[in-house]
Image (spheres, grey):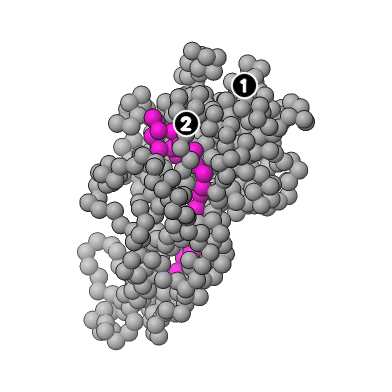
């Protein structure tokens, strides 16, 4: 057993208990009723960074929730790693589908996590993964093994689009200056198949509103004679995909980069079982764009999905009504080179154009961000790969993810540095879903791997 492993073994229970305390605070950024809890979480992060050995830690105000910033600069001539994470979490709804309350963490064994997993909202996304960095820092400072400078930037608005972080980054270029950005807010293939995320999709999120008559109408007296906004909205949405599941918005694919045969062949080498994929989701078939595999569909191809749709009567029993309005929330996942603001415009124009006479359509953009791909020949990637090699005993597979962390592209634009995405979650950890969890093994493996990244990054720099 090496030095890191014995330190982790000795402090394992405390590491777990500290994370559990953090998970008890419901830092739901989307719901203003939890404002005090979100702020309380920022305070808790500040204290934990101080305890981990940062020299200065500040709670930086923004127009929204604060950014917790901490640093330890040991030598200006050594490289600087900027760690990014988020302390806010998704709303836990639907609450009744949780097997234990979302903010009362419990440890239970699962098929994928025979050593136990911590069940709580934010366990994996991102409190658990962010806190691995705090504990790795504690290990390095308390054993005098911090090989380089480190800066932490932990934000509280990632789950609602990081809209104030962009300004914070633009206004603090000097403070945030770094040689590489390190983030654990993604996943890996399996505990025995380590992988490093090399790409994230961009995002354009919009809300649409279709208005028909000026009031709700009796569906017998008026039905058939006026446009029903819900009928129209569903028809419009259905027309956004053709029979091959291509998106029909003119210009949507204009900047989409087609991967070469070789790149696709390389991707196809990653271990993947369609049978287990279907089984885990209880579906008899996958569904998607013709001509692409499941792994391609959910990473290198753009998508359009309805995230929510409502209108009319949804209460108990039946009410005969033609609603005045119908609504939907729609997300488009984008690939690098697609500009999210341009895609939002294309969507808006197209959606307004296809509206039939008899309804009015309003499209409201929410938020968005660009996609990201990181090179695999950088010092950062090599250092990460060596670190995984040591702790997993296997070379990690580079893999593009379908999820989005929109701020990553902005980091590159403003701070001119590459991001390394060392995620330790599994797809089955149910992030954003009921019963989110994070494997204890994964948590500790992360704490073990991170200091090695620091070591190799400094050596290779
Ligand atoms: N950590 C996730 C993103 C993620 C998860 C990327 C797993 C890759 C693998 C992040 O917190 C998230 O949920 N992002 C949102 C976008 C945001 C603008 C709300 C997403 O991807 O839906
Ligand atoms: Mn996250
Ligand atoms: Mn998330």
Local crowd at mark 2 within 10 Å, few (<14), some, or many (≥20)?
Answer: some
Left or right side of 233 for 32: right
Q: Main secondary structure of the magenta part?
A: strand
Q: Is residue 415 above or below residue 246?
A: above
State the residue at coordinates (25%, 50%): 283
Q: Quarter-wise, where is residue 457 in the image?
A: top right
Please tell me whether residue 206 belongs to the stretch shown in magenta.
yes
- Mark identifier at residue 395: 2
In the rendered view, does 83 fall on the left or right side of 204? right
- Residue visible at 29% across and 46% down? 274
In the rendered image, the residue lying farthest to the front is 262
Q: Quadrant of the C terminus?
A: top right
- The crowd level at tag 1 (other Cα within 10 Å; few <14, some 14-19, many 20+) is some
The residue at the point 63 percent across, 51 percent down is: 410
Queried whether the magenta region covers residue 342, the answer comes back as no
- Please state the horizontal and vertical placement of residue 93, each as a whole percent of the image: 38, 48
Which mark sits nearer the N-terminus, 1 or 2?
A: 1
Is label 1's Cβ within 8 Å of ligand 2? no
Q: Is residue 186 visible?
A: no
Q: Which residues are magenta?
A: 187-209
**207 in relation to 296, above or below:** below
Give the number of the disc on residue 140. Answer: 1
Find out whether the residues at labels 1 and 2 contact each other: C-beta distance under 8 Å: no
Please state which of residues 354 and 245 is positioned toward the viewer in this rendering: 245
Could you tell me how many numbered marks the image carries?
Answer: 2
Q: Secondary structure at mark 2?
A: loop
Considering depth in this image, is 233 or 426 the residue closer to the camera?
426
Residue 147 place in picture, x, y as percent? 67, 24
Q: CA distance from mark 1 to mark 2?
A: 24 Å
Residue 409 image offset from top left, x and y in percent: 60, 51
Splitting the image into 4 quarters, where does residue 342 fall? bottom right
């Amino acid at each position: 057993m090496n030095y890191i492993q014995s330190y982790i073994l000795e402090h394992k229970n405390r590491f777990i208990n500290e994370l559990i305390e953090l998970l008890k605070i419901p830092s739901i950024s989307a719901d203003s009723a939890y404002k005090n809890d979100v702020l309380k979480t920022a305070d808790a992060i500040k204290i934990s960074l101080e305890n981990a050995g940062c020299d200065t830690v500040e709670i930086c105000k923004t127009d929204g929730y604060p950014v917790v910033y901490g640093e330890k600069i040991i030598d200006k001539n050594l490289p600087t790693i900027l760690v990014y994470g988020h302390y806010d979490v998704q709303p836990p709804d639907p609450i009744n589908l949780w097997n234990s309350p979302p903010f009362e963490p419990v440890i239970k064994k699962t098929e994928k996590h025979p050593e136990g997993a911590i069940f709580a909202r934010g366990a994996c996304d991102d409190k658990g993964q962010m806190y691995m960095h705090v504990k790795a820092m504690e290990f390095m400072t308390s054993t005098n093994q911090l090989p380089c400078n480190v800066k932490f930037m932990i934000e509280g608005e990632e789950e609602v689009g990081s809209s104030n972080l962009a300004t914070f980054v633009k206004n603090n270029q000097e403070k945030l200056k770094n040689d590489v950005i390190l983030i654990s807010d993604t996943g890996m293939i399996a505990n025995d198949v380590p992988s490093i995320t090399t790409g994230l999709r961009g995002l354009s999120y919009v809300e649409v509103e279709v208005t028909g008559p000026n009031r709700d109408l009796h569906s017998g007296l008026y039905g058939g004679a006026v446009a029903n906004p819900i009928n129209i909205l569903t028809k419009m949405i259905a027309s956004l995909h053709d029979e091959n599941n291509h998106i029909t918005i003119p210009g949507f694919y204009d900047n989409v980069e087609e991967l070469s045969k070789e790149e696709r062949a390389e991707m196809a080498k990653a271990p993947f079982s369609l049978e287990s994929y279907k089984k885990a989701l209880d579906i008899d078939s996958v569904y998607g764009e013709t001509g692409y595999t499941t792994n391609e569909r959910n990473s290198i191809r753009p998508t359009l999905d309805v995230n929510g749709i409502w209108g009319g009567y949804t209460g108990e029993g039946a009410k005969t009504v033609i609603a005045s309005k119908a609504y939907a929330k729609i997300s488009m996942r984008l690939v690098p080179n697609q500009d999210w603001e341009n895609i939002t415009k294309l969507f808006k124009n197209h959606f307004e154009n296809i509206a039939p006479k008899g309804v009015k359509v309003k499209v409201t953009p929410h938020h968005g961000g660009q996609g990201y791909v990181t090179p695999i020949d950088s010092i950062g990637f090599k250092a990460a790969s060596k670190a995984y090699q040591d702790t997993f005993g296997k070379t990690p597979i580079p893999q593009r993810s379908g999820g989005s962390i929109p701020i990553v592209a902005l980091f590159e634009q403003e701070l001119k540095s590459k991001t390394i995405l060392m995620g330790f979650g599994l797809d089955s950890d149910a992030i954003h879903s009921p019963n989110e969890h994070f494997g204890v093994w994964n948590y500790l493996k992360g704490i073990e791997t991170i200091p090695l990244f620091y070591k190799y990054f400094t050596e290779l720099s």
